[in-house]
Image (cartoon, rainbow, N blue to C red):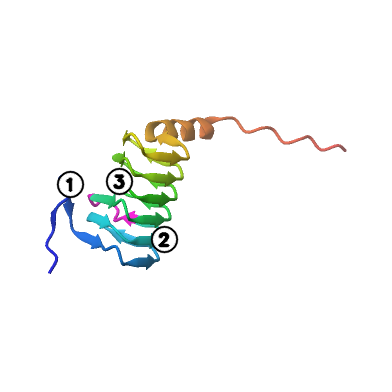
Amino acid sequence: MFKPKPGRHGETIDTLIGPQVVIRGDVVFSGGLYVEGRIHGKVLAEDGAPAVLTLAEQGSIEGEVRVPVVVVDGQLQGDVHASERVELASKARVLGNVHYKVVEMRAGATLTGRLIHSDAAQAEAVASAAAPLPFPAAANG
């Protein structure tokens, strides 16, 4: 029986997706999820639940990630939305935009996409909503 144990960053690992596992479809979880295998689909934290996703060096995810705390040391293809923290370890390979509140990126990590601070994204959305709409062209007649 698998017992939750602390990960290398002190977060508890409740669920392990082993290196031989391939999941095709969305994964919704709470607690700590440690991925050594492959996921083809979205990885989502349950609304309001504390959650930490750790993607191991040999693991890969193809799909959007929406988790409060994301630690990447493997390959991730898709946008990341982390409401608390993103950590890109030295072997991280991310192809997609990373939306974050706090980010840590170690030497050797690669990101092909944009780093978007959550406060900046909210300010941009408010600014675009407040922008005046153009007047429609007057009809000839």
Span shown in magenta: 44-50
Residue type beneath disc 2: Gly
Q: Position of residue 21 (x, y in %)?
A: 32, 67
Sequence-wise, the earlier of marks 2 and 1 is 1
Q: Residue furthest bottom?
A: 1
Q: Residue 43, position in %: x, y?
A: 35, 56
Going 42% across and 31% down the picture, which residue do you hit? 120
Q: Which of marks 3 and 1 is nearer the N terminus?
A: 1
Residue where numbered disc 2 is placed: 41
Q: Mark 1 points at which residue?
A: 8
Q: How many other residues sit within 10 Å of disc 2, few (<14), some (14-19) or many (≥20)? A: some
Q: Relative to 64, is 14 on the left or the right? A: left
Q: Which residue is drawn at 44% across and 30% down?
A: 123
- Under mark 3, the amino acid is Val
Residue 38 picture quarter: bottom left
Question: What whole-number distance in Å separates the C-alpha atoms at marks 3 and 1?
Answer: 13 Å
